[in-house]
Amino acid sequence: MKIKSKILIIAGSDSSGGAGIQADIKTVTALGSYAMTAVTAVTAQNTRDVKSIIPIPTKNIQKQITMILNDIGANGVKIGMLHNTSIIKCVYKILKKYKLKNVVLDPVMVAKGGTKLINNNSIKYLKKLILPLCNLVTPNIPEAEVLIGSSISNKKDMIEAAKLILNMGSKNVLLKGGHLKSKMICDILATKKGIKVFSKRKIKTKNTHGTGCTLSSALATCLSQKKNIVKSCKISLRYVDKAIASAPGYGKGFGPLNHLVSFNLRNINV
């Protein structure tokens, strides 16, 4: 397989391999692109919980990113955990300076087990600085509630929330509906052209560790390969759905996905 594009991943490390940088690399590779990384934090975690989070010094993060961009360059960017305000400001300056394209933000705020991964002041700067530079932001419902400052309890609320987040500056918003208690999942894509709803039946499973990381990396990969926003969403959502359905069942908590599932899908590029 020929490598189709180059993706810069700016995110935290997950020692268990199911989420963060590790899930991002697997996803980008499985979908045919070349993954490069800037690690923002090192976590000690497994499928059950997060025991510690050690932020990487901002100057080191800056150096990681600029070394990549000054040599190899990037066709797309996936941004995950930006642990504090200093890191957010650093990434903002680099995005502006290098005029990076196909920027996808997964606004990581809370781990699957409930551990908070970002402080309140950082959330303010994430909204103010990073969102306006993004082609796509991919919050789940709890993250969207933090961004808009109100609760979301149904599909109508999701659509309104997606519109509000769109007005914060991102070119597109994909609001993920997996947290709603219903048999069907509705993911809401908000663009300048309007709203599109992607519906699918919810899979009853605990193997959902790293779904947000995987989806956002898939989206950055598809966009960097010059697929439009709707097609990128279709491909990425299908990839994640199949990766959940074929999860290996590792660990005693929220297990990881099967990132290799794309090798078994004859037509992942639907």
Image (tube, helix red, strand yellow):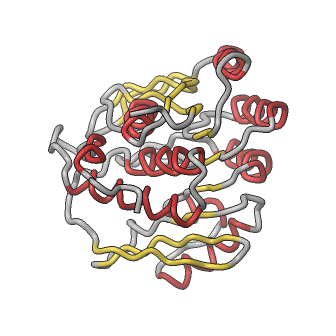
Q: Quadrant of the C terminus?
A: bottom left
Q: Is residue 135 above or below residue 35?
A: below
Q: Is residue 154 left or right of residue 74?
A: left
Q: Is residue 83 above or below residue 246?
A: above
Q: Quadrant of residue 239?
A: bottom left
Point 69% across, 30% down: residue: 87
Point 55% across, 77% down: residue: 196
Q: Nearer the viewer, residue 157 or 224?
A: 224
Q: Residue 21: x percent and y percent?
A: 46, 31
Q: Is residue 11 left or right of residue 191?
A: left
> Which residue is at the far front?
2
Q: Is residue 205 left or right of residue 131?
A: left
Residue 148 visible in the shown view: yes
Q: Is residue 54 left or right of residue 214?
A: right
Q: Is residue 57 above or below residue 153?
A: above
> Which residue is at the far right?
97
Residue 10 visible in the shown view: no
Q: Residue 53: x percent and y percent?
A: 47, 27
Q: Nearer the viewer, residue 124 or 240?
A: 240
